[in-house]
Amino acid sequence: MSFPRTNRILALMPLGAVLLLGQTPGKVPPATPTFKSTTRIVLVDVVVTDSSGKPVRDLKARDFTVLDEGKPQRIVAFEEQRSDATPRPPVALHLPDQVYTNYVTRSEPGALTILLFDSLNTDRMHLTNARNKMLDFLKRLPAGKRVALYALGSQLRMVQNFTENPDELMAAAEQLSTQSHWTYSNAKELSAAIGELQETDLRKNPTALRSLMRSLGEEYEGKLESRTQYTLDGLTELAHALAVVPGRKNLVWISGGFPFDLSSNAPELQRVAALLAATRIAVYPVDVRGIAVTSAEGQTRDSEIFAPVQTQSYETLSGQDEENAGIIEAMENMARITGGQAHVNSNDLEGAIADSVETGADYYSLAYRPAGVEWHGQFRKITIKASRRNVKLLHRSGYYAFPDISGLREDSDRMVAMAMQPSVPVSTQLIMKARVFAPETAGAATKVDILIDVHDLGFTEEKGQKTPDTQFVAVAWDGNGKQCGSFSEGFHAGLSPAQFESLLRTGLQLHQEMVLKPGTYQLRLGVMDRLAGRIGTLDVPLKIETRATAK
């Protein structure tokens, strides 16, 4: 049984009359959603390999046993995905002129691969080596593998969209910067900086020395907090960007370590992990630092700041051992909860990348309906067993029982602001169609129509009326990344049963106009469902010609 995503919006009425009723401009007041109870399905991708790491194929649903918190589950849907299968023909959209959509089709068998080059959490020395090893991997990548390349800094940036051409990937990878992000720091650098302070004349003034040491510590913690937020934001944007792409996506995260304190970041990590799981993204962290070297590298003098008599190793005293253990733990936990595999303490970086790509290429998709679950965000453990002997199963360790995507609501204003940036990948959590008409006379406005499927929206319900909380946004960016125009329109009207049924058939449409000077723009359109915490964005190329003013 396959798992198609119903593409209802492409069957809606053509963009035409304005259907947006009771418009409310700007920000709309928050509401408490009352979502209808729905039958929830848990979908798990399972990679099955033999003792030599080769994929085990042709298994059936009866060959698997699924346990949810130890209770057996009935598999209601099953599908095998093989990388050697014949590609399915892509869906032809046949959109009219000047009509655009963020819907994407995929015809390739097996899992897709995303390489994430992390300059945010990696020092320069390891970044240079990581890029070189990634290029070596791409030189040997056979044609036909669908791979995309992203970079993580203050924002997530798509460097190369999915392609089967290794030369395109190599050309994109060669442009990657090997400069560390300004927020990058580690325990060794902090220890060395404090050690240098101790060898200055400040040691004669203990009060001033302690004050500067405290300032260095606070600066380090501040950088760590910034990196943590940037990293979580980047993963969130990646989940949004790949939301509608069907099937398993293997995220090969090439990094020097995740800045996650599992105790303080638990709620944020849960939300991001749930988003990744919902988008079927399995994380394969690759630690670019290689095998940890237990040497002070000539800087053992720094240990004097921790103890007058050194009874422990420099790495322990400086916090490096604790930091390294935390990095490895975070990598392994992220892999475990998403169904990937971590590669740590290995100097074979190229081999780790290749293994990550190959390991998850073939997989089985199992779906079941758990009974008696209270959907309040608690973590539920998944155990899967196979009747075939001497095989290894790789799958996510469980799921957070959020009530659909509504349990993942974020700060919607911040979410919209991030998603509308031109460098952020397009989000496909909400599918949208748009029609854009450039002006035909000087000084006239660009006309924009946006259409979304009402089936995909969340609603509150009161006195027989259903009320959405939807925001339509557009921003025009010029070639220099300057914002040259925008609009934001909210829709928060109560719908009678008749109006609701009508919109189910026709979709919800906004019409807006924007006056722009002659030039070339990237028009980013967006729709935010504030109740469900989902967003869709779409880029439309726009060129406004210089025209003579009509007399």
Image (cartoon, helix red, strand yellow):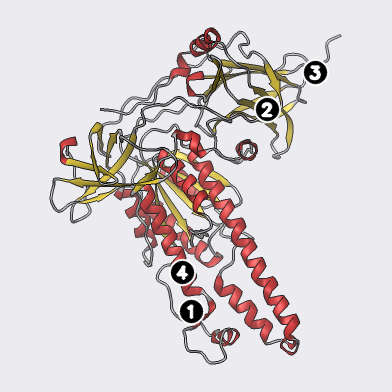
Q: Please, what is the three-letter code of the amino acid marked with disc 4? A: Asn
Q: Please, what is the three-letter code of the amino acid marked with disc 3? A: Gly
The CA distance from mark 3 to mark 4 is 60 Å
Q: Residue at x 62, y 40 (%)?
A: 418
Q: Is residue 243 above or below residue 207?
A: above
Closest to the observer, 524 or 272: 272
Decide: few, some or many residues near mark 4? Use Cα within 10 Å; few <14, some 14-19, many ≥20: some
Q: Residue at x 65, y 37 (%)?
A: 413
State the quadrant of the C terminus: top right
State the quadrant of the N terminus: top left
Q: Please, what is the three-letter code of the amino acid marked with disc 2? A: Val
Q: What residue would you read off at disc 2?
A: 28
Residue 196, image x and y in percent?
A: 66, 82
Q: What residue would you read off at disc 4?
A: 324
Which comes before the other along the chain, label 3 or label 4? 4
Q: What residue would you read off at disc 1?
A: 316
Which comes before the other along the chain, label 4 or label 2? 2
Q: Is residue 454 above or below residue 531?
A: above
Q: Which mark is residue 443?
A: 3
Decide: few, some or many residues near mark 3? Use Cα within 10 Å; few <14, some 14-19, many ≥20: some
Q: Quadrant of residue 74?
A: top left
Decide: few, some or many residues near mark 1? Use Cα within 10 Å; few <14, some 14-19, many ≥20: some
Residue 504, image x and y in percent?
A: 49, 13
> SS class of the residue under badge 4?
helix
The image shows a total of numbered marks equal to 4
Residue 74 as seen in the image, left or right of residue 396: left
Which comes before the other along the chain, label 1 or label 4? 1
Residue 206, image x and y in percent?
A: 72, 85
Residue 84 as seen in the image, left or right of residue 190: left
> SS class of the residue under badge 3?
loop
The CA distance from mark 4 to mark 2 is 46 Å
Q: Residue at x 13, y 47 (%)?
A: 388
